[in-house]
Amino acid sequence: MAENERPDLGAMVMRLGRRLLAMEQPILEQHGVTMWGYVVLTALRDGPARAQASLAAAINADKTRLIPVLDDLQKRGLIERDPDPADRRVRLLGLTPEGRRLQQAVQAEIRAAEEIMLSKIKDQAAFVRALGELSA
Amino acid sequence: MAENERPDLGAMVMRLGRRLLAMEQPILEQHGVTMWGYVVLTALRDGPARAQASLAAAINADKTRLIPVLDDLQKRGLIERDPDPADRRVRLLGLTPEGRRLQQAVQAEIRAAEEIMLSKIKDQAAFVRALGELSA
DNA sequence: TATTGTTATACTCTATAACTATA
DNA sequence: TATAGTTATAGAGTATAACAATA
């Protein structure tokens, strides 16, 4: 019974998730961006998106709850959001230079905080790799 | 830039959390218990709790959102919930034999499903240990 | 008629505040 | 008066359904 004495994976993952979220919150606030805003900026970092619906699917969000996020990011000049000339129903989404700068700045701080957290455990590389595989 | 090419920890942990939750859902439903109900049964497995508030704190829940959960578990004979004779304001909480059986049955199935998931990665033991440390 | 994006609405989850009963 | 538990209410967050624009 002793070797089975650990919490369920789900419980541990959830607790870690809450902890990470709490760690990121002040960083995001300091840069005036919400978690969803940051998620969108990060999703657009590697390339523009065609259509809001596909972006929503990519980040596991409902298309309707993306809209206020995009409104805000656009209003602040962090993303471009233009009708596709070929099909004016769809919106072409991409980062502005300032959006890219903000994403990089926030991500750098988050990564630094993650490193501090990870430095407390032994098998950092194995953990991160396994986490990547399990969440892929 | 290539070695930095991984999602943020938070994103990966959240995705894995969603996946684990989806995995557990059918097991919980099959046993007619909600996630919070299972969390309560599991918290009581290692010993009774004195006062609902301390139980709530132990599982990171608000005391008010515990009440319908306890109502249901009690009505189904899975927990005992009696006023403390020494201070009749507080409720003494514990598992009934049937509650203990249900907790064990559900947990066994969840562990089995976890094992299948974990079997796909290489450093299982290291991952679980690191996860335990980071979430502790 | 079908599809993209938007708005309006409803629903779920959670927390806050008011209440009761004991002390 | 203070505390444990409960109930009522309100607030986020999210999803569903109706709508407008374009194809």
Image (spheres, coloured by chain):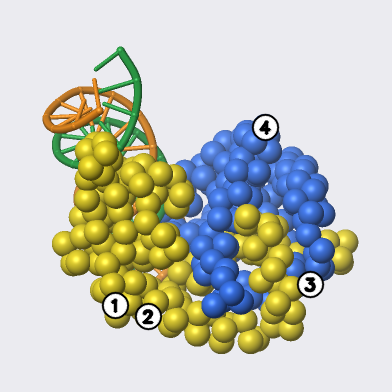
Chain colours: A yellow, B blue, C green, D orange
* SS at mark 4 in the image: helix
In which chain is the residue bearing label 4?
B
The residue wearing badge 3 is B126
At horizontal 27% and vertical 39% (from top left) the residue drawn is A86
Q: Are marks 1 and 2 on the same chain?
A: yes
The residue wearing badge 2 is A105
Q: Comparing marks 1 and 4, which lies closer to the viewer?
A: 1
Judge the density around disc 1: few (<14), some (14-19), many (≥20) Cα neighbours within 10 Å. few
First reached walking from the N terminus: tag 3 or tag 4: 4
Quarter of the image that includes the N terminus of chain B: bottom right
In which chain is the residue bearing label 2?
A
Between the residue at mark 1 and the residue at mark 3, the CA separation in whole angstroms equals 35 Å
The residue wearing badge 1 is A31
Residue A64, position in %: x, y? 30, 42
| Observer-nearest of B93 and A18 | A18
Between the residue at mark 1 and the residue at mark 4, the CA separation in whole angstroms equals 45 Å
In which chain is the residue bearing label 1?
A
